[in-house]
Amino acid sequence: MSDKLVNYYRIEKALGFLTAHYKEQPDLDEIAASVFMSPFHFQRIFTDWVGISPKKFVQYLTLDHLRQKIKETENMMEAADEAGLSSQSRVNELFVRIEGVSPQQYKSSGKGLEIFYGYHASPFGLCFIAVADKGICALKFIDEEKSRNEFELFSAQWQFASLVHKPDLTQAYVKKIFGPPVAGPEQMHRHQYAGEDLQLLVKGTDFQIKVWEALVKIPFGSLSSYQQIARTIGKPEATRAVGSAVGANTILYLIPCHRIIAADGSMGNYHFGKARKMAMIGWELSHT
């Protein structure tokens, strides 16, 4: 495993420690000790990963700050609707579009589709990605301490598709998604693939797809709540169903279910753990 991946898992473990002990406000020494590192070494790898200190990073994750981000997102999306602006999503500067599989392919679990897959490093650990001609159809992060069953789960969902291991092809997509920002003060946070499109091929019910389309409208570095998404899709009473649809998402990060938190500012649930969700939210906030 590369040093970058090892360092990410150390950071994730440290964030897990913070999640469990945030009320005690642990200092740098205590956080570093939780991952068996010196404070100096931990601060260095953390700052190298995210660009800011652990102390500043934690400030982004306070309940008050996260609640404020929810309000900002709601105001931003309302203003865009009133102005008639496009709600096309961006991950950094990549445009994301969602397309559902055909009804026949939905019923036949992808019969006739050829899907390529691979495993790659990302800022949030090792990831599994699968790509068909019509777009990305899976992106999941891998917890090294749990069972590696992402391929089995994916192949069960697309059991009649032809699955081909082709990491040289999928690596290009991972670079597109997580590539470094363009250098230069005016473009510090613009993506090196700015303006390019990413097509997603999803397999879900009409309601699930509607929720996922609402999720991709949440801007990079912003947060929303289950209630906001329910209102956005015109189903204000369907908060619980929205939560189920969010949990059914199989294209993580690009359909950004990590940007959904509880209305009170708490993290809520995340299939890949609250520590990884904290890492993703804090990483995005620190890059905006």
Image: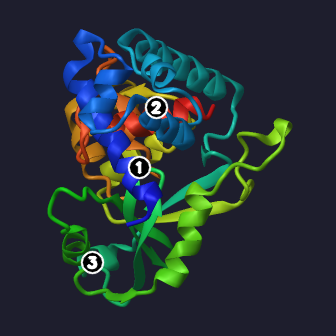
**Percent position (x, y) of residue 185?**
83, 36
- Circle nearer the N terminus (1, 3): 1
Quadrant containing the C terminus in the rendered view? top right
- Circle nearer the N terminus (2, 1): 1
Vertical relation: 31 (above or below) 181: above
Please tell me which residue is depicted at 58% across the width and 22% down the height of the picture: 78
Quadrant containing the N terminus in the rendered view? bottom left
**Tag 1 near tag 3, CB within 8 Å:** no
Residue 117 visible to an observer of this rendering:
yes
Q: Amino acid at mark 2?
A: Phe
Please tell me which residue is depicted at 39% across the width and 25% down the height of the picture: 228
Q: Amino acid at mark 1?
A: Asn
Q: Secondary structure at mark 3?
A: loop
Residue 176, numbered circle: none
3 relative to 197 in the view: left or right = left
Which of discs 3 and 2 lies nearer the camera? The answer is 2
**Percent position (x, y) of residue 45?**
48, 41
Vertical relation: 250 (above or below) 85: below
Q: Secondary structure at mark 1?
A: helix
**Percent position (x, y) of residue 90?**
61, 46
Residue holding disc 2: 40
Q: Across the whole image, how many numbered discs are drawn on residues?
A: 3
The crowding category of the residue bearing disc 2, from other C-alpha atoms within 10 Å (few below 14, some 14 to 19, many at least 20), is few
**Which residue is more in the foreground, 14 or 120?**
14
Residue holding disc 3: 158
Q: Secondary structure at mark 2?
A: helix
**Tag 2 near tag 1, CB within 8 Å:** no
**Which residue is more in the foreground, 277 or 28?**
28
The crowding category of the residue bearing disc 1, from other C-alpha atoms within 10 Å (few below 14, some 14 to 19, many at least 20), is some
Residue holding disc 1: 7
> Label 1 to label 3, Cα distance in Å?
33 Å
